[in-house]
Image (cartoon, rainbow, N blue to C red):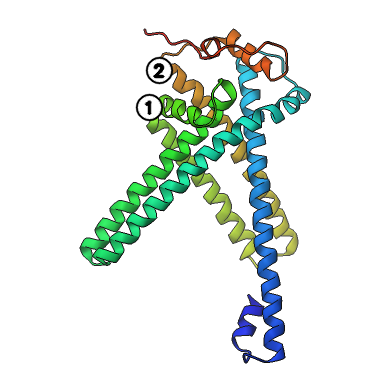
Amino acid sequence: MYDQDTLNYTKAGTPGYAKLSDIISSEWTFFWLFKAAYFTFLLIFSLLSTSAVVYTIACIYTAKEISFKKVMSVVPKVWTRLIVTFLWSFAIVLVYNVIAGVLLFSSVYFLGLGSLGLSIFVVLFILYLAGFVYISLVWHLASVVSVLEDVYGINAMEKSKALIKGKMGVAVAMFLLLILCFVGIQLLFEGGVVLAWWLSTEIRIGIGILCLLLLFKVTLLGLVAQTVMYFVCKSYHHENIDKSSLADHLGVYLGEYVPLKAKDIQLEQFHV
């Protein structure tokens, strides 16, 4: 930021201007490379964490013996299924954002920002947010389906879409609560670390560590909540969860059982 401000007040064509331009270009290159590495690491860590937590919760539910070594041996076999589901979700979100962006831009371009145009823009934006939240919920539940059932990718998305019906209110409330927690941690970090220049370095480091621990806890809570939400949705739709079949399905990842067929893994449905 300081180099950019200095460049704005430096005469173009001078050696100083060329030197500052090179420095700024190098800084931006490093910034985007760091961002790319950060998001790649975040994606990998997220998928690994999801597979580990979902598998652990399912083992606890089925009273199956669990250990750290077993979880770590299962994670590499499970997360490839999650990658396929994630890629489908990413493609859907990308198409959705492009269509939404075109509609929002068109409303502003053709109707302007008068009372009518602004009202339509706000309505479209609210609908966009609602759709984005819905897609996010379906994706998170599809991640659990990809681990606990024999479907993944677009099939897991369709299964998740069917499961979430009837429990949308609970899912949205859970999603918004987690978002509020993340926003609270972000505000605490900015207010206590980034902008709190009057505080001592030790206190700011302590607040930063506290924010990191809180972020870990909220992330773990979210992963556990989406797994529990899967079982709640199965129960709501009167789908009996056969613990023995589910335990067998989990054992497939460890090579303990021969993979079951879809009709065996798919938890049978019954009506009260």
Q: Position of residue 151 (x, y in %)?
A: 54, 23
152 vs 115: above or below:
above
The residue labelled by disc 1 is: 165
What type is the residue that disc 1 sits on? Lys
- For the point 63% across and 40% down, which residue is it? 46
Q: Position of residue 136 (x, y in %)?
A: 47, 40
Give yes or no for contact between labels 2 and 1 (Cβ–Cβ under 8 Å).
yes
Q: Which mark is residue 14?
A: none
Q: Secondary structure at mark 1?
A: loop
In the picture provided, is 131 more to the left or to the right than 254?
Answer: left
The tag earlier along the polypeptide, 2 or 1, is 1
The residue labelled by disc 2 is: 237
Q: Residues within 10 Å of mark 2 (few under 14, many from 20)?
A: some
Total residue callouts? 2
Question: Does the rendering let one see residue 198?
Answer: no
Q: In this view of the protein, which residue sits in the foreground, 184 or 115?
A: 115
- For the point 23% across and 67% down, which residue is it? 114
110 vs 89: above or below:
below
Question: Does the rendering let one see residue 27?
Answer: yes
Q: In this view of the protein, which residue sits in the foreground, 121 or 61?
A: 121
- For the point 55% across and 56% down, which residue is it? 187
Q: Position of residue 163 (x, y in %)?
A: 43, 24
Q: Secondary structure at mark 2?
A: loop
Q: CA distance from mark 2 to mark 1?
A: 9 Å
Residue 213 quadrant: top right
Residue 33 quadrant: bottom right
- For the point 46% across and 36% down, which residue is it? 137
